[in-house]
Amino acid sequence: MDHIDVTVNGRQRPLTGISAHTTALDWLRETGLTGAKEGCAEGECGACAVLLATSDGADGTTWTAVNACLLPAAALDGQEVVTSEGLGSADALHPVQERLAEAGGSQCGYCTPGFACSMAAEFYRADRVPADADGQEHDHDHDHDHGPNGFDLHALSGNLCRCTGYRPIRDAAYALGEPEPADPLAARRGRPAPAARATRLDGDGERFVRPASLHEALRMLRDEPEAVVVAGSTDWGVDLNLRGRRAALTLAVERLPELRSFAVGDDAVEIGAALTIAEVGRRLGGRVPLLAEAFPQFASPLIRNRATIGGNLGTASPIGDTSPALLALDARVVLVSAGGEREVDLAEYFTGYRQTLRRPDELIRAVRIPLPLAPLAAFHKIAKRRFDDISSVAVAFALDLDDAGAVTAARIGLGGVAATPIRARATEDALVGRTWSIETVRDAASVLGGEGTPMSDHRASAEYRAVMLDRALLKLFRSAPREEVPA
């Protein structure tokens, strides 16, 4: 094992006594930093949240909240972490800790350290601007998602609490001011985040490797195609914690520059597979409205800060939220191996339940979305909770209309109604060539309700899923801005 270490709360610590399958949470707790807790072990509760120093896209650092229960400890090699213990001390509480205490934002206390870390990430967000920063008085009552201090309450949507009812936690968040000039974590934002470091950990027949280059990663995959590839590790952690899965070789690719491309051209948008969902959203800046609508409904900020767009496609889950949206966008997947690149239509990429065209020696390098985009687009997610939940049904629409109001092209992506994400081909055919009207929509909706092969499970019955499909097209018609529909 090469020497590996991590900076935790400003102190460099060797990553000793870990295996390829030790989580960051387990390692932190074994070192005595027991603030972070294991609640769900699958990234839904946020009790394990910590702060990770990540690049702000320029020469500075962003404090990013992540789930320590899902993160390989070895992936922290060369990185910087702050836990709840590092935010303040018993003698000098951090502003987040002070506000939580004053507002009564903690009862049993189990979730509090995770809340504190997620709240601190939002506290240090560089573009957090108070609503009255322009010096004018504003009515904040109409905005239930943002405080007068600019705090985005959705920053806490991955943290669950069973005791407080959330109101005191919200009050604490909205009472936060700006970081003081002498705040060391605020000052840290002005320096670059730690660079990626090639990592090798070998012991007990298990290896964790972060290759130094894409060439090395592809060579290893060619020679050891059974390797488990991880990027954000949000699925890796669940497989480890809940299913007890162990791989002989874990290959981490999230820091490879070749997998982190981003370009907006005349004909297409290219998104690197190792970019996180949060990064993609920031870089797109609303230029793909369908993704801008889908991403806030994708799990929680804690998950979006680690989950990658390539990983979401790589797992080939029939309920992955990006797949229906990318199907509606007519996206293509760029696959790369030691032998070269190939590009496949996403609609042909999924071949069976959690099966794809990707060979064991290939990586997803990028996703390409053709331009121009359809003007009428929407993403509908049906789930038991509005946020931080898995889809029962997901539907994405992208429609082109001519000047007379006729549908000239239709692409509809579906999730949760078949063994794979699918295109609603029959419904698309029922729309194309017809006027975009309530009569057309009703006819096509009856077709959409019969698409796929929905099944009954603990999230929804097959009948419910079919009804939700039927209603989705009617909802699109009734909610579409009139300016998007020619008169």
Image (cartoon, grey):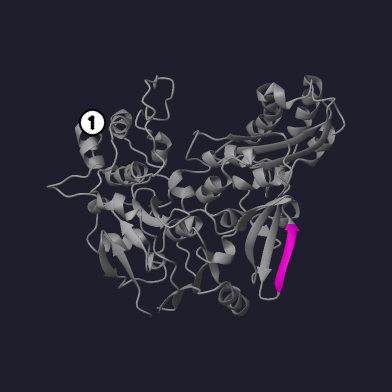
Residue at figure coordinates x 37%, y 30% from the top left: 133
**Relative vertical location of residue 476 with respect to residue 15 in this rendering, above or below:** above
Q: Which residues are magenta?
A: 340-344
Residue at figure coordinates x 41%, y 35% from the top left: 152
Tag 1 secondary structure: helix
- Which x, y percent locates residue 110? 27, 44
- Which x, y percent locates residue 86? 24, 54
Query: Which quarter shows the N terminus?
Result: bottom left
Q: Nearer the viewer, residue 240 or 224?
A: 224
View extreme (front): residue = 135
Q: Nearer the viewer, residue 124 or 82?
A: 124
Taking the image as drawn, is residue 74 in sight? Answer: yes
385 on left or right of 92: right
The answer to whether residue 428 is magenta is: no
* Circle 1 residue: 103
Residue at figure coordinates x 23%, y 41% from the top left: 95
Residue at figure coordinates x 23%, y 49% from the top left: 182
**Relative vertical location of residue 328 with respect to residue 264 in this rendering, above or below:** above
What's the magenta bit mostly, secondary-structure-wise?
strand
- Which x, y percent locates residue 74? 39, 68
Q: Nearer the viewer, residue 265 or 166?
A: 265
Question: In which image quadrant can residue 29 be found?
Answer: bottom left
View extreme (right): residue = 433
- The mark total stands at 1
Question: In which image quadrant can residue 224 be found?
Answer: bottom right
249 on left or right of 88: right
Instruction: Name the amino acid type tagged 1.
Output: Ala
Alpha-carbon neighbours of circle 1 within 10 Å: few (<14), some, or many (≥20)? Answer: some
View extreme (left): residue = 91
Taking the image as drawn, is residue 36 in sight? Answer: no
Query: Which quarter shows the C terminus?
Result: top right
